[in-house]
Amino acid sequence: MKEYTCFHCEHQVTSVHPVTFYEQENENDQLLCDHCYSEWLESLKG
């Protein structure tokens, strides 16, 4: 089973969510674990 590294917490995980962060004019594609992804979604709600 393939392992990935979460962009935010840097834990090794087997399940990730691809997200794109926009910084000025650049797109930054990263992978987030389930926990960090759910926190990121909550932050979008405001």
Image (tube, helix red, strand yellow):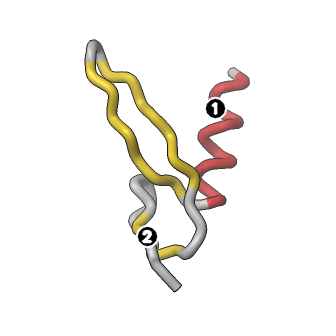
The vertical placement of 43 against 23, above or below, is below
Extreme residue in the bottom direction: 1
Q: SS at mark 2?
A: strand
* Residue name at image x 29 percent, y 14 percent: 24
* Residue name at image x 60 percent, y 68 percent: 15
| Numbered label attached to residue 4 | 2
**Front residue of 1 and 37:** 1
The percent position of residue 36, horizontal first and vertical second, equals: 58, 53
- Of the residues tagged 2 and 1, which is closer to the observer? 2
| Numbered label attached to residue 43 | 1
Callout 2: few (<14), some (14-19), or many (20+) C-alpha neighbours within 10 Å? some
Left or right: residue 5 versus residue 18 is left
* Amino acid type shown at disc 1: Ser
Q: Which quadrant would the C terminus be assigned to in this image? A: top right
Q: SS at mark 1?
A: helix
The vertical placement of 34 against 15, above or below, is above
**Front residue of 1 and 45:** 1
The percent position of residue 33, horizontal first and vertical second, equals: 56, 60
The vertical placement of 27 against 10, above or below, is above
The percent position of residue 32, horizontal first and vertical second, equals: 51, 54
